[in-house]
Image (tube, grey):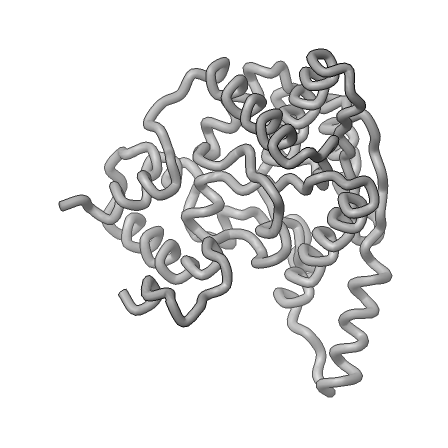
Amino acid sequence: MKSLQQEIIAELGVASSISPETEVKKRVDFIKGYLTHTGSKGLVLGISGGQDSSLAGRLCQLAVEELRQVTGEDYAFIAMRLPYGVQRDEEDAQRALRFIRPDKSLVVNIKEAVDESVRSFLDGAGVGLSDYVKGNCKARERMISQYNVAGHYGFLVVGTDHAAEAVTGFFTKYGDGGADLVPLFGLSKRQGKELLKYLGAEPVVYEKVPTADLLDDNPGQADETELALTYEIIDDYLEGKEIAEEDATKLEQRFLATRHKRTIPVSVLDTWWKD
């Protein structure tokens, strides 16, 4: 009988070790294949300046460039900057864009839309949103903006979900968790770093402390602080290594508690939630 760790690894498709060259080709080919299958001529992705969007963005750009070369058609990748007001780590985002070299870059400031949503809730409910719920509002507004652009151009929205994020449920449902394709799926955090190194990214791109950066009260709060788990521990678990029992229990509890985030809306035919 499989252990829960083995079941999670299988469900999330994580390999214990990878070849960066092979993984880059596989994921670029996946993007190209899905674009061809859907008939869409382009991709949209929000760029934060962190590891995940930098990697996904570069893979997207490589995919559309290869499609243009092979087909002669106008495939394109649009990178979107989606700050809430003034982004304190804007230079990181600009560095990521220089690495990605997107066909087109757009900036949509989400502050006005988010603040209006917060005000509307206060008017209707008589209470204010917590900082965490407002943070989720930011993530969802960013995805709304990406789908607005994708809808206008007939493009697909790319997500940055990977195995270390999926196992913890550390994303906003219908926010950064909402996308048309997720080319990083199955990669641990350290494996994503390996791909960025292979692609020639500056170390500062993949060594930046991971943060969702959604909270007003704690701007730039590290993911590992929020999770109370390090990515090294999470990656070890996903790659089949033995970790401390306490950490394994914590990680498995998060996986089970956030399973609803990794499914389509539950229906009367679904039974997994009764397990």
Q: Quadrant of residue 90?
A: top right
Q: Residue at x 50, y 39 (%)?
A: 162
Residue 101 picture quarter: top right
| Residue 58 relative to residue 253: left or right | right
Q: Give left or right: position of 210 versus 15.
A: right
Residue sitting at the far left: 1
Q: 155 or 160: nearer the eye?
A: 155
Residue 34 location (% of width, % of height): 59, 32
Q: In this picture, is 86 found above or below 48? A: below
**Side (left or right) of 105 relative to 261:** right
User: Residue at coordinates 39% horizontally, 62% vertically from top-left?
Assistant: 257
Q: Residue at x 73, y 52 (%)?
A: 142
Q: As displayed, is residue 213 above or below residue 99?
A: below
- Outermost residue on the bottom side: it is 126
Indicate the quadrant containing the C terminus: top left, top right, bottom left or bottom right. Answer: bottom left
Q: Where does the image place residue 140, in percent across and percent down from the top left?
A: 68, 58
Q: Would residue 86 be found to the left or right of residue 220 on screen?
A: right
Whole-percent x, y for residue 144 in the image: 74, 55
In this rendering, the answer to whether 234 lies above or below 194 is below
Which sits in the foreground, 64 or 134? 64
Q: Residue at x 76, y 34 (%)?
A: 79
Front in this rendered view, residue 237 or 46? 46
**Quadrant in the picture for residue 163:** top left
Query: 45 or 43, which lies in front?
Result: 43
Residue 265 locus on image (x, y percent)? 50, 63
Total marks shown come to 0
